[in-house]
C-alpha cells in the first residue's frame, strides 16, 4: 500500500486535554437531601476526601477518543496476519444484532423462564460447537481461551484425583506450544514436561514415549500446531498417552485450519477449549473481551464447570447438578455478547462453514509459496508439507546476511499499511514470522503482502539501514521497549509518569 | 458453497491452480483418512442464511425472552442496571478499536495503547493505588487472580474471605485456588450490621496467617464495610495482604480503598460502561498499592507503560514488564491470561472521563439518595431491611416471610426485584435484594412501594 500514512494527532493524555473542570454527562441531583441523610450515617473516614480525575465536556471526550481510534489499526483497515490469532473479518450484522438492548439490559439473575431466547442461543451455540469438535458437551462460561485451558487442566487434575491417581502431576507440552498452555498447566498445579518437535514439524514421538510415565496426567496439544502443520501421528500420540494413563487436551486456537474437516474428539482428545473470538468471528476488541468455550467427552463430561446451559425437552435451563464439577470458573454464564456473535456467524454460514478451513488453507499455501522463495527467507520445519491455517518462516539468514531481522521486517510491513504477523514465535524458529491470513483476505491483499515482503527483503540487501528506520508512516516511530522497561522508567499511570518527569 | 464473508471462496479453482493442487483434499493429505469428514457438519439451519433471514431468526429468538421491564429492574446481586452513555457506545463501535488485536505492534496501535494507559491511570486514581493492569476478564476472575497474586507474594497458602463477598466470586476463588492447595477460609458477618465480623476475622487471621484477607464494600448485602482500616491493621499485623473488592461506581462517595489499607483492589466495569449483558462481558479491575515494588513483579495480565522512541524524539506507550506473562515466561508466568477485556476497559475510561470528578461524585450521591429513598418507602410499605444497623448503598437486603411470593407478585407486574439469597445463604432464605441506581426515578420507587404495599396489605401512610 504505497502512500500509507497513519493519523498522527498530537493528542495529549486525557489528563492534559483541558485544565477546566466540566461535565460530559449530566447526573441528576433530585435525591440530594436523601443522599446527605444517608451519607451522614457513615463515619468521615470511609467517605471520599478528594477525587481528581479529568472532567471534560462531551465533545472533548468524543474528539479525544475518536482521534485515538484513528491511531489504531484493526481488521477493518487491512490485514492483521497475526499467527495463531485468527484475525478474521468480523461481520457487521453480528455486531449490530448482538448490541441489542434486550441483551445489553438483560440481568443475569432474571429467571430462566424469562430468558428462554437467550438460553436457546447459548445452548444451540454449545451444541454446534460440540458437533464441530466432536465432543459431547461444551460450555461458554469461560470468558476467553486461556480460561478454557485452566478449566480443562483443572478437569484433568480432578479426574485423576477421583480415580485415585492424584500422583499424576506432569503435563506434557510440545516446545512449539502457545505460552498459555504451560501457564495454564502450572496454574492447575501441574509440572510441565516439554517435548521437542521433529524435522517434519510433528511432535517427536520418541521423545514423547520417553516422557510418558506413571506421573503423566496428560498432554496439551494444538492441532494444527503453531507451525501450521497437522500432527501426522495424532492417532498414535493419542494411543500412547492413553496407554500411559494420561488424558488429551486440545487447544482450539488453531481450529480454523481444519474446521469441518477433522474433529479433535475423533482424534482422541478428552477436553478442548475454543476461542470464539478467533475461529467464530467475534472481534478481538484490541485485546478482549473474547469468549471461550470448554468442551468435554466421555468421562470428562462430569467434570465440566457449572452451571451449564441445558435443555430438558421443554425448556432451557441452568444445570447445576454436574456430579464431579470443578465448580465455577467465572461468575454468571460467560461473555454472552461475543457468544451471540459467534452463534449468528455459524447460523449464517451453515454448511458453508467448510469454506472457512478450505480457503484459510488455500490462502496460507498461496502466500507461503510466494514468501518462502524470497532471498534470506527459510521454511524451517516440514519441507514439502502443506500448511493449514498458518505458516512460519525464518528470517535468520536475512539477519545474518544483512543485519535486518524479523522485527525490522515487521516494522517495515507497518509502513506499507499492513499489520505485522506474530514475530519471534514459536520459540523453536529463529527470527520467526508466524503468518495467518485467514479465509477473509482477498487474493489482491495476499499479493500485496507478498509484494511488501519482497520489497523489504530486497531493500534489506541494498540498504539495510533504510529498513531499520521503519516505521515512519505509523503514528509514532519505532518505540524503545528497553527504555520503558527499565525499573527507573516503568510508568504505567499518569501520576507515576508525572513523578518520573519531575525527577528527570 | 461460496460465501460473501469468504472472498476467495469464489476463486478457489484459481488458487488451487496457483499452488498446483487439483483438489482441496490434497491439502489435507496429512490428516489420517479415518479422521477426515466428508459431509457437511450439522450446524446452522441446513443452508446459509441471508442477512435478512439472520435478522429475523435473531428477532424470533429475542421474542422468546418473556421478560419485560415495566419499570427499570430493581435486580441486584453484584450487578445492577446502570446507564451506558451514548458516547461510550459510539467510541466502542469505532472499528479501529474493536477489530484491533492486543497491541503487539504498538506503533500502529498507539491510540488503543494510550486509551488503555488512561484507563489504568483513571482507575488507579479512583482506588488510590499505584498500578492497575489493563484488565482481566471480570470482577470474579480479578478476585481469583488477586488471591493467587497474594499467595505468590507472601508464599503462604491460605486466604480468608469475608462471607459477605459475592458468593459467586467466592465460588470462583475456590475453583481457582483449592485444587492447588490454597485453603479458603471464611469469616462471618455481624448479624445486626451485615458488616464483616471483626472478632471472627481477627481470630481466623491470627490462627491461619493467611496470604490475604478479602472483603467487599459495599458487600453482597449492599452494606458499606466501615472498618477497612481495622481489617487492614489485623491483616497487616499477621503479614497478610488486604484485597478489597469495590464497584467503581461508589468511588465518588466512598474513600479510596488504597487509602484505607488495601494492598490489592478489585472490581468490575459493569457499572461504568459495560452494562449487564446477561452477565458478560465486562472488564475485571485489578490494581495494587505497592510502595516497595514487591507486588508489581507478581502482577498478572497486560500492563501498558510509557516509553520513548528509539531515536529519543517522540513519546509513546507499549506493553511493559511482559516477562511476567505467559508468552514469554510460560509455566513460570504470573497468570495464563492472554485476551483480557481491553475494549471494556476503554469504555470505562470513556465513561469515567465523561463523568469527571464531579459527575462521579454526583453519580455516587444519586445512588445513595435513591437507596435512602427506597428504604424509606419500602419501610413504610411494610418491608424491613434484614440488617437494620447496616448502612446500605445501591442494594438493600429486605426480609419478609413471604419474600418469594412478593417477588413473583411483582414479577407478574413487570417489576423485578432479587435475587433471593437463600440459595447462597440458607439462614437468609426469607431475604431478597433490591437495587436502585441513577436510572430509577422517584415515581419508579413509589410505584414499587405501592405494589409492595398492595401485596402486604399495609394501609397507605
Image: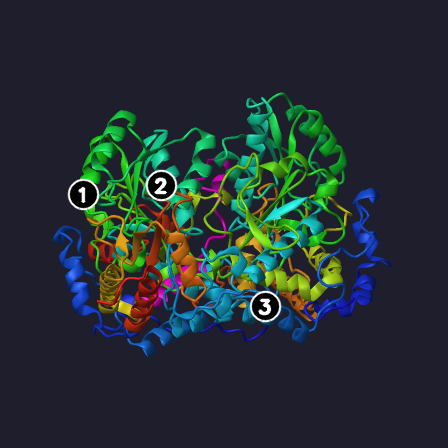
Query: On residue B122, which mark appears?
Result: none
Image coordinates for residue A107, horizontal then vertical, percent: 44, 60
| Residue B65 shown left or right of residue A301 in the figure | left
Contact (Cβ within 8 Å) of mark 2 with mark 3: no
Q: Is residue B458 magenta?
A: no
Magenta stretch: helix, strand or loop mostly: helix
| Of residues B16 and B441, the one drawn nearer to the viewer in this rendering | B441
Same subunit, tags 2 and 1: yes
Q: Which residues are magenta?
A: B328-352
Determine the secondary structure under disc 3: helix
- Gap between marks 2 and 3 measured at Cα: 39 Å
- Gap between marks 3 and 1 measured at Cα: 48 Å
Q: Judge whether residue A101 can be spotted in this image.
A: yes
Residue that badge 3 annotates: A94
Same subunit, tags 3 and 1: no
Query: On residue B229, which mark appears?
Result: 1
Residue that badge 2 annotates: B297
Q: Residue at x 39, y 74 (%)?
A: B87
Protein chain holding label 3 = A
Image coordinates for residue A41, horizontal then vertical, percent: 15, 55
**Within-10-Å neighbours for mark 2: few <14, some 14–19, many 20+:** some
| Residue A422 shown left or right of residue B109 in the figure | right
Among the 4 quarters of the image, the one containing residue A315? bottom right
B16 relative to A323, above or below? below
- Gap between marks 2 and 1 measured at Cα: 26 Å
| Of residues B134 and A319, the one drawn nearer to the viewer in this rendering | A319
Amino acid at each position: 500500500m504505497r502512500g500509507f500514512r497513519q493519523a498522527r494527532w498530537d493528542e495529549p493524555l486525557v489528563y492534559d486535554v483541558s485544565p477546566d473542570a466540566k461535565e460530559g454527562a449530566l447526573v441528576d441531583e433530585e435525591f440530594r437531601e436523601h443522599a446527605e441523610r444517608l451519607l451522614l450515617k457513615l463515619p468521615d473516614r470511609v467517605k471520599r476526601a478528594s477525587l481528581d480525575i479529568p472532567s471534560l465536556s462531551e465533545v472533548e471526550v468524543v474528539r479525544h477518543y475518536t482521534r485515538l481510534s484513528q491511531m489504531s489499526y484493526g481488521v477493518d483497515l487491512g490485514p492483521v496476519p497475526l499467527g495463531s490469532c485468527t484475525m478474521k473479518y468480523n461481520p457487521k450484522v453480528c455486531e449490530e444484532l448482538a448490541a441489542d438492548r434486550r441483551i445489553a439490559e438483560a440481568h443475569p439473575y432474571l429467571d430462566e423462564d424469562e430468558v428462554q431466547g437467550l438460553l436457546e442461543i447459548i445452548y444451540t451455540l454449545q451444541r454446534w460447537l460440540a458437533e464441530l469438535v466432536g465432543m459431547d458437551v461444551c460450555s461458554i462460561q469461560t470468558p476467553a481461551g486461556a480460561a478454557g485451558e485452566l478449566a480443562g487442566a483443572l478437569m484433568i487434575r480432578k479426574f485423576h484425583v477421583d480415580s485415585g491417581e492424584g500422583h499424576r502431576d506432569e503435563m506434557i507440552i510440545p516446545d512449539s506450544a502457545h505460552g498459555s498452555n504451560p501457564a495454564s498447566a502450572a496454574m492447575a498445579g501441574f509440572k510441565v514436561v516439554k517435548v521437542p518437535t521433529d524435522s517434519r514439524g510433528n511432535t517427536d514421538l520418541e521423545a514423547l514415549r520417553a516422557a510418558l510415565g506413571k506421573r503423566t496426567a496428560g498432554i496439551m496439544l494444538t492441532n494444527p500446531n503453531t507451525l501450521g502443520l497437522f500432527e501426522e501421528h495424532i492417532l498414535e500420540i493419542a494411543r500412547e498417552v492413553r496407554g500411559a494413563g494420561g488424558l488429551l487436551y486440545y487447544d482450539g486456537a488453531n481450529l480454523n485450519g481444519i474446521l469441518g474437516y477433522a474433529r479433535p474428539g475423533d482424534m482422541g482428545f478428552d477436553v478442548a477449549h475454543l476461542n470464539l473470538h478467533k475461529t467464530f468471528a467475534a472481534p478481538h476488541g484490541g485485546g478482549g473481551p473474547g469468549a471461550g468455550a470448554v468442551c468435554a467427552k466421555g468421562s470428562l463430561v462430569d467434570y465440566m464447570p457449572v452451571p451449564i446451559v441445558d435443555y430438558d425437552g421443554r425448556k432451557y435451563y441452568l444445570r447445576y447438578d454436574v456430579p464431579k464439577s470443578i465448580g465455577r470458573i467465572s461468575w454468571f454464564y460467560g461473555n454472552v455478547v461475543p457468544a451471540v456473535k459467534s452463534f449468528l456467524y455459524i447460523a449464517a454460514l451453515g454448511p458453508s462453514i467448510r469454506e472457512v478451513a478450505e480457503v484459510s488453507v488455500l490462502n496460507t499455501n498461496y502466500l507461503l509459496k510466494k514468501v518462502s522463495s524470497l532471498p534470506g527467507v527459510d521454511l524451517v520445519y516440514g519441507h514439502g508439507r502443506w500448511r493449514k491455517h498458518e505458516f512460519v518462516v525464518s528470517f535468520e539468514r536475512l539477519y545474518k546476511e544483512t543485519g535486518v531481522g524479523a522485527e525490522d521486517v515487521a516494522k517495515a510491513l507497518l509502513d506499507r499499511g499492513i499489520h505485522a504477523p506474530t514475530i519471534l514465535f514459536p520459540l523453536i524458529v529463529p527470527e520467526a514470522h508466524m503468518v495467518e491470513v485467514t479465509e477473509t483476505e482477498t487474493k489482491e491483499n495476499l499479493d500485496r503482502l507478498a509484494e511488501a515482503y519482497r520489497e523489504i527483503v530486497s531493500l534489506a540487501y541494498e540498504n539495510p539501514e533504510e529498513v531499520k528506520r521503519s516505521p515512519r508512516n505509523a503514528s509514532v516511530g519505532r518505540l524503545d521497549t528497553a527504555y520503558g522497561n527499565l525499573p527507573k522508567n516503568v510508568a504505567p499511570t499518569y501520576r507515576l509518569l508525572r513523578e518520573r518527569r519531575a525527577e528527570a | 458453497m461460496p460465501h460473501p464473508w469468504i472472498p476467495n471462496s469464489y476463486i478457489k479453482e484459481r488458487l488451487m491452480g496457483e499452488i498446483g493442487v487439483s483438489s482441496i483434499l490434497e491439502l489435507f493429505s496429512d490428516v489420517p483418512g479415518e479422521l477426515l469428514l466428508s459431509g457437511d457438519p450439522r450446524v446452522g439451519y441446513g443452508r446459509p442464511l441471508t442477512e435478512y433471514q439472520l435478522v429475523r431468526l435473531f428477532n424470533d429468538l429475542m421474542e422468546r425472552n418473556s421478560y419485560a421491564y415495566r419499570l427499570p429492574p430493581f435486580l441486584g446481586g453484584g450487578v445492577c442496571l446502570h446507564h451506558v452513555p451514548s458516547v461510550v457506545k459510539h467510541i466502542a463501535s469505532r472499528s479501529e478499536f474493536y477489530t484491533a488485536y492486543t497491541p503487539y505492534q504498538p506503533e500502529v496501535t498507539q491510540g488503543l495503547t494510550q486509551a488503555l494507559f488512561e484507563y489504568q491511570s483513571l482507575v488507579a486514581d479512583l482506588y488510590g493505588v499505584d498500578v492497575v493492569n489493563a484488565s482481566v476478564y471480570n470482577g470474579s476472575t480479578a478476585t481469583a487472580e488477586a488471591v493467587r497474586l497474594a499467595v505468590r507474594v507472601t508464599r503462604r497458602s491460605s486466604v480468608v474471605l469475608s462471607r459477605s463477598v459475592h458468593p459467586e466470586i467466592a465460588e470462583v476463588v475456590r475453583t481457582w485456588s483449592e485444587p492447588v492447595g490454597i485453603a479458603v477460609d471464611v469469616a462471618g458477618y455481624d448479624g445486626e450490621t451485615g458488616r464483616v465480623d471483626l472478632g471472627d476475622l481477627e481470630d481466623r487471621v491470627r490462627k491461619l496467617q493467611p496470604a490475604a484477607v478479602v472483603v467487599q464494600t459495599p458487600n453482597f448485602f449492599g452494606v458499606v464495610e466501615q472498618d477497612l482500616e481495622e481489617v487492614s491493621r489485623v491483616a497487616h499485623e499477621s503479614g497478610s495482604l488486604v484485597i478489597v473488592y469495590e464497584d467503581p461506581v461508589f468511588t465518588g462517595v466512598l474513600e479510596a480503598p488504597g487509602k484505607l489499607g488495601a494492598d490489592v483492589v478489585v472490581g468490575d466495569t459493569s457499572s461504568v460502561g459495560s452494562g449487564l449483558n446477561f452477565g458478560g462481558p465486562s472488564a475485571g479491575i485489578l490494581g495494587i498499592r505497592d510502595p516497595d515494588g514487591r507486588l508489581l513483579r507478581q502482577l498478572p495480565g497486560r500492563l501498558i507503560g510509557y516509553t520513548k522512541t528509539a531515536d529519543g524524539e517522540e513519546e509513546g506507550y507499549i506493553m511493559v514488564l511482559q516477562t511476567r506473562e505467559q508468552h514469554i515466561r510460560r509455566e513460570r508466568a504470573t497468570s495464563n491470561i492472554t485476551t483480557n477485556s481491553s475494549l471494556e476497559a476503554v469504555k470505562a475510561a470513556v465513561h469515567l472521563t465523561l463523568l469527571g470528578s464531579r459527575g462521579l461524585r454526583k453519580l455516587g450521591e444519586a445512588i445513595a439518595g435513591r437507596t435512602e429513598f427506597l428504604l424509606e418507602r419500602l419501610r413504610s410499605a411494610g418491608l424491613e431491611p434484614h440488617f437494620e444497623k447496616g448502612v446500605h448503598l445501591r442494594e438493600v437486603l429486605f426480609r419478609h416471610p413471604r419474600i418469594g411470593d412478593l417477588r413473583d407478585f411483582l414479577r407478574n407486574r413487570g417489576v423485578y426485584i432479587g435475587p433471593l439469597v437463600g440459595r447462597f445463604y440458607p439462614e437468609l432464605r426469607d431475604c431478597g435484594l433490591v437495587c436502585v441506581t441513577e436510572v430509577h426515578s422517584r415515581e419508579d420507587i413509589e410505584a414499587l412501594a405501592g405494589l409492595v404495599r398492595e401485596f402486604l396489605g399495609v394501609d397507605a401512610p
